Image: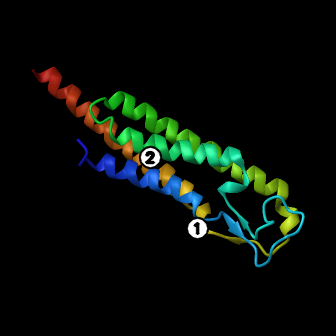
Amino acid sequence: MLQRIQSIFLLLAGAASLALFGFPFATTPTEVEGSMLFADAAYNVQDQPALMGLFGLAGVLAIISIFLFSKRLLQMRISIFSFIANLIGVVLAVIFYMQNSSDAGDTVNDGIGIYLPVAAMIFTLLAHRFINKDEKLVRSMDRLR
């Protein structure tokens, strides 16, 4: 059902993944000329098309899986794909930052966007746990019939 706790966790995971389109990973006090990431003084998802695709996919998958409450096994698979997309997105974001961190110098401040993918992954894992718990409950009830 839609009012289950895993639906709330999946909604929060989707919201955290999609909120990255509004919050930067890191900022600098001034624009850095010649920098690929900090040319606009903020390193955000829009700087890399791969990050846009991965975090957008993760958010959409989490929200889609909310409506698959009657197919719990499929819901668990899609939530794992959402987790993997977030994980790959975080790894790529760190790699892109490490490749271009020398351009910005020592004045880089972290933004709220650095914590959102971690929160999305935690919410996805919690949702997966509760979906699995529901599946075990349904299987045990079927066995008792």
Q: Which numbered marker is on residue 112?
A: 1
The C terminus lies in quadrant: top left
Q: Is residue 19 above or below residue 109?
A: above
What percent of the width, then of the height, locates residue 22? Answer: 57, 63
Q: Residue at x 12, y 23 (%)?
A: 144
Residue at image x 77%, y 57%? 97
Res 124 label: 2
The amino acid pointed to by label 2 is Thr
> Which class describes the residues within 10 Å of circle 2: few (<14), some (14-19), or many (20+)?
many
Q: Quick one: quadrant of the N terminus?
A: top left
Q: Front-most of 60 and 139?
A: 60
Which numbered disc, 2 or 1, marks the residue that appears first in the sequence?
Answer: 1
- Is 29 in front, or is 33? 33
Identify the secondary structure beneath mark 1. Answer: helix
Give the CA distance from mark 2 to mark 1.
19 Å
Residue kind at label 1, given as amino acid type: Ile
Query: Which x, y percent locates residue 51?
Result: 66, 48
Q: Which mark is residue 141?
A: none
Circle 2 SS class:
helix
